[in-house]
């Protein structure tokens, strides 16, 4: 099944992705972003949804619904404002969930 | 550990013994599953970490390129250049079963025949910084897709490992000891019943002998 890739974030961070063939949805980090994310994730046309770290941080509740599904994979990427370490924290939380404590990246 | 609320009968004992063997076998299998899942998960999560570091580093470079581009071009012309993309990446999603966890596999396909055909603008009125930015982002795309695939797999696997670990623990520390103790309890109870009926019979026999023949055991 062919699906696409979406990128949600502030327009500065994501405009380049449009050129390389991903679908971009510019928005600011507020409640509308959460709604937008939900609308996009529910359409089931995207296999991967990249969120900038700001958007990723505020859509925690919405992301829960897609955690145990195979698609969409919701992945945080750093925006122009720089890396906030959310990605690494997310990895640690996986290890913590699986092992019981973070034994790999302390 | 509390014993189960069962009748101490022979039938119950056989039933419990059967359940105990099943529980022990299930425990062994789940433990193997957990160990194997864990081994794969650790490999995957290490690759994930490596890839994420790389992607985040290179994405920062890409963003720097874009900032450079927007410094030399006006915002309008930059946006206009990127407005109508030529390329469209679609992903073929298939699934792979790893120890009963279905993890996704993504294979990317581009719309145009030539994968390098990425620049959605003419080169005449744009700066080379923009070309750099778009090109570096395009080079990063396979890594981004692979990162998405691995990170989703890690997410699914960690949930499954947690579930399996809980099952193994509850079998090991709750179910199996409980079965064992209940079995022991029933066995003791049956033996006790056995002994008490034996002494009763002996007593009755004594009484009968005394009554009929005036025998005395004393």
Image: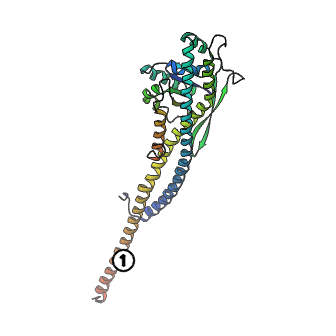
Q: Where is residue B29 drawn, in percent x and y?
A: 54, 54
Q: Where is residue B18 drawn, in percent x and y?
A: 49, 60
Q: Nearer the viewer, residue B27 or B129?
A: B129
Q: Which residue is mark 1?
A: B198
Q: Nearer the viewer, residue A5 or B68?
A: B68
SS type, badge 1: helix
Q: Where is residue B211 drawn, in percent x and y?
A: 28, 85
* Image quarter of the C terminus of chain A: top left
Q: Is residue B141 visible?
A: yes
Q: Where is residue B174 drawn, in percent x and y?
A: 41, 55
Residue at 63% in and 28% down: B139
Residue at 48% in and 21% down: A36
Colour scheme of the picture? rainbow
* Image quarter of the N terminus of chain A: top right
Residue B179 is drawn in which quadrant?
bottom left
Give the number of marks: 1
Residue B173 is drawn in which quadrant?
bottom left
Q: Residues within 10 Å of mark 1 (few under 14, many from 20)?
A: few
Residue at 38% in and 61% down: B7
Above or below residue B71? Residue A37 is below
Residue at 64% in and 10% down: B125
Q: Is residue A20 visible?
A: no
Please state the chain letter of the residue tagged with numbered disc 1 in the rendered image.
Answer: B
Residue B65 is drawn in which quadrant?
top right
């Amino acid at each position: 099944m062919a699906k696409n890739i979406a990128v949600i974030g502030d327009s500065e961070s994501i405009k380049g992705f449009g050129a390389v063939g991903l679908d971009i949805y510019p928005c600011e980090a507020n409640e509308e972003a959460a709604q937008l994310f939900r609308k996009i994730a529910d359409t089931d046309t995207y296999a991967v949804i990249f969120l900038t770290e700001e958007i990723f941080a505020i859509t925690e509740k919405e992301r829960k619904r897609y955690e145990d599904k195979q698609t969409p994979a919701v992945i945080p990427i750093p925006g122009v404002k720089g890396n906030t370490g959310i990605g690494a924290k997310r990895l640690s939380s996986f290890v913590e969930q699986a092992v019981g404590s973070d034994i790999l990246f302390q | 550990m509390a014993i189960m609320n069962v009748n101490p009968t022979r039938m119950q004992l056989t039933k419990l013994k059967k359940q105990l063997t099943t529980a022990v076998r299930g425990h062994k299998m789940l433990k193997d599953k957990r160990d194997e899942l864990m081994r794969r998960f650790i490999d995957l999560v290490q690759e994930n970490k490596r890839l994420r570091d790389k992607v985040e580093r290179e994405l920062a470079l890409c963003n720097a390129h874009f900032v450079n581009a927007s410094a030399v071009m006006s915002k309008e012309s930059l946006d206009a250049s990127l407005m109508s993309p030529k390329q469209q990446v679609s992903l073929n999603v298939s699934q792979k079963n790893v120890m009963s966890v279905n993890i996704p596999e993504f294979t990317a396909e581009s719309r145009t025949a030539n994968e390098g055909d990425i620049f959605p603008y003419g080169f005449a009125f744009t700066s080379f910084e923009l070309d750099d930015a778009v090109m570096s982002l395009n080079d990063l795309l396979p890594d981004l897709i692979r990162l998405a695939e691995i990170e989703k797999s890690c997410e699914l696997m960690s949930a499954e490992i947690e579930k399996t670990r809980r099952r193994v623990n509850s079998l090991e520390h709750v179910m199996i000891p409980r079965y064992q103790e209940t079995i022991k309890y029933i066995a003791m109870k049956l033996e006790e019943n056995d002994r008490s009926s034996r002494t009763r019979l002996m007593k009755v026999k004594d009484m009968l002998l005394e009554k009929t023949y005036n025998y005395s055991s004393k």
